[in-house]
Amino acid sequence: MNNFKHKKSLGQNFLKDETILNNIVNAVDLQKNDLVIEIGPGQGALTKKIQEKKVNLICYEIDERTKPYLEKIKESKTNIIYEDILQADIYGDIQDYKYENLYVIANLPYYITTPIIKKIIDSNLNVKTMLLMVQKEVAERFCAKSGSKNYGSLTIYLNYFYEIEKLFDVPRTCFNPAPNVDSAVVKFQKRDNKFKVLNEDNFFNLVKNAFRQKRKNLKNNLENYDLNKINDILNNYNLSLKNRAEEIPIEVFVTISNNL
């Protein structure tokens, strides 16, 4: 694809490092009865590695200029859909497949990383594992623990559904063209035992409000809630309304939400 004009507007940075490509695909135990969704196959480098596992594969590619390259590597178990993943009916697209486990593997465009992940969650796909290449700083935010500066409402939202770990960093030199930042591969593993939240809407609203102004404490950010009840719960964890949201573990937010 030496003559291919990469579109910065689409976040087109194609992975070219063979070792990294192999490490991504081998990070999960893919079997021939599984179904993999790849987002943004681009030149098909990662696509070919996935195909070696003999799985069913659906690729979503927004840029039809990649069609001549992708059609060359298309196989009987590979379906390439030239559509914006954010507009696609993913749930409908996978209904004709019989599969054991569902995986998502993607080198995500940096500018729409979070919307794509939310799309997958909202589509009720029952994804077992996601292997996602994202900006390194974003990966650290996804995996952050309470008490760290990277811990935020997005961290809690994603960790509510998945156990998340950073597998390895990927230098910018592994891409063509090279982006301005380094990347990391993150593994999202579906939680077998989700947090027992009585009302998800109330829980996510509580978390969002708690982080409304990150430099302010809970007393200020949650002023419209029952502060006495919240404080009683916090005291059980040796915390108080003087703490900031970034210091509150997800299980404490769950307890507060359920009691409210």
Image (spheres, helix red, strand yellow):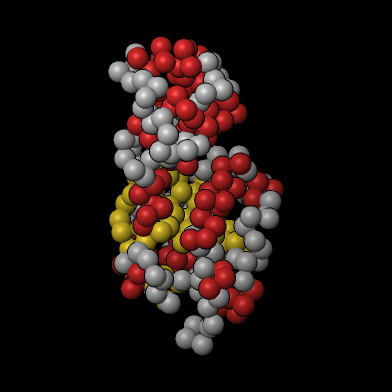
Q: Position of residue 184 (x, y in %)?
A: 36, 57
In this picture, residue 233 sits left or right of residue 55: left
Q: Residue sitting at 37 percent across and 55 percent down? A: 137
Q: Residue sitting at 55 percent across and 75 percent down? A: 7
Q: State whether residue 196 is above or below residue 157.
A: above
Q: State whether residue 150 is above or below residue 55.
A: above
Residue 255 placement: quadrant: top left
In this picture, residue 102 sits left or right of residue 89: left
Q: Position of residue 38 (x, y in %)?
A: 52, 59
Q: Nearer the viewer, residue 227 or 208?
A: 227
Q: Position of residue 227 (x, y in %)?
A: 48, 17
Q: Position of residue 219 (x, y in %)?
A: 45, 24
Q: Residue sitting at 52 percent across and 78 percent down? A: 6
Q: Residue sitting at 47 percent across and 12 percent down? A: 229
Is residue 40 visible to the viewer in this orientation of the structure? yes
Residue 230 placement: quadrant: top left
Q: Nearer the viewer, residue 191 or 180?
A: 180
Is residue 71 visible to the viewer in this orientation of the structure? no
